[in-house]
Amino acid sequence: MKLNEKLATIQTKFKSKKSRFNSFGKYYFRSAEDILEATKPFLLEHGVTIIVNEELIGNGLDEFRSIKTTATISDGLEFISATAVVGVDLNQKGMQMPQRFGSASSYGKKYALGNLFLIDDTQDSDATNDHGASSSNVKQWLSEGNKSYDKAVEYIKAGGKVDAIKKKYSMTKDVEAHLQSL
């Protein structure tokens, strides 16, 4: 069986409970650890491994950095990857620097794994909770591979402007350049 068939089987059968509770927002959510735990029964059954890698994006002088997380499934011959890019707010109040990076790392892992296993994050309250962001100017990150990015591409191809997208989303210079080129 080819890797894409193995992944399709896992995606179809995959279930990950929302076992964590956010007492501030009063909702249940799933974490990256929950997703990884739910994948374990499939690993030996399908002869695959899951690897999660992270890369810090930024030159050290940026006020805002990002973490690019890549979740990869492999059977030793082939591999399929999915990514997520999450911003690290270096000025986040109430958190020490390691907590800021740790929080962004956790979100990146969760969303890269969610992209790989086709977890519909619209049903996850954590995805719809803005954590108070609606009262500030914090924007969601637009990155390749998520539904918002696909909608942005459609919008640009239909004659929309990148500046309108930038009002709603944060994006890397590479994503902006790609949208501008469409």
Image: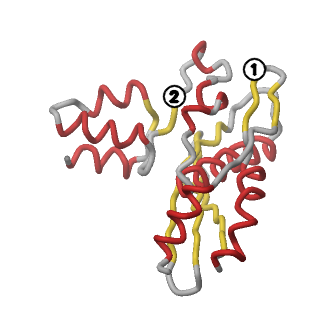
Q: Tell me the amino acid under the disc marked 2.
A: Lys
Image location (x, y in percent) of residue 149 = 38, 42
Give the alpha-carbon distance from disc 2 to disc 1, as whole Å.
Answer: 19 Å
Determine the image quadrant of residue 146. Answer: top left
Could you classify mark 1 by the number of other residues whose Cα lies within 10 Å: few (under 14), some (14-19), or many (20 or more)?
few
Determine the image quadrant of residue 51. Answer: bottom right
Image location (x, y in percent) of residue 110 = 66, 48
Q: Is residue 26 above or below residue 73?
A: above
Q: Given this view, does label 2 or label 1 mark the residue nearer the observer? A: 1
Left or right: residue 103 versus residue 146 is right
x 74%, y 56%: residue? 38
Mark 2 element type:
loop
Q: Where does label 2 land, which residue?
A: 139
Q: How many marks?
A: 2
Residue 53: tell me if it is visible: yes
Residue farthest toward the bottom in the current orientation of the protein: 77
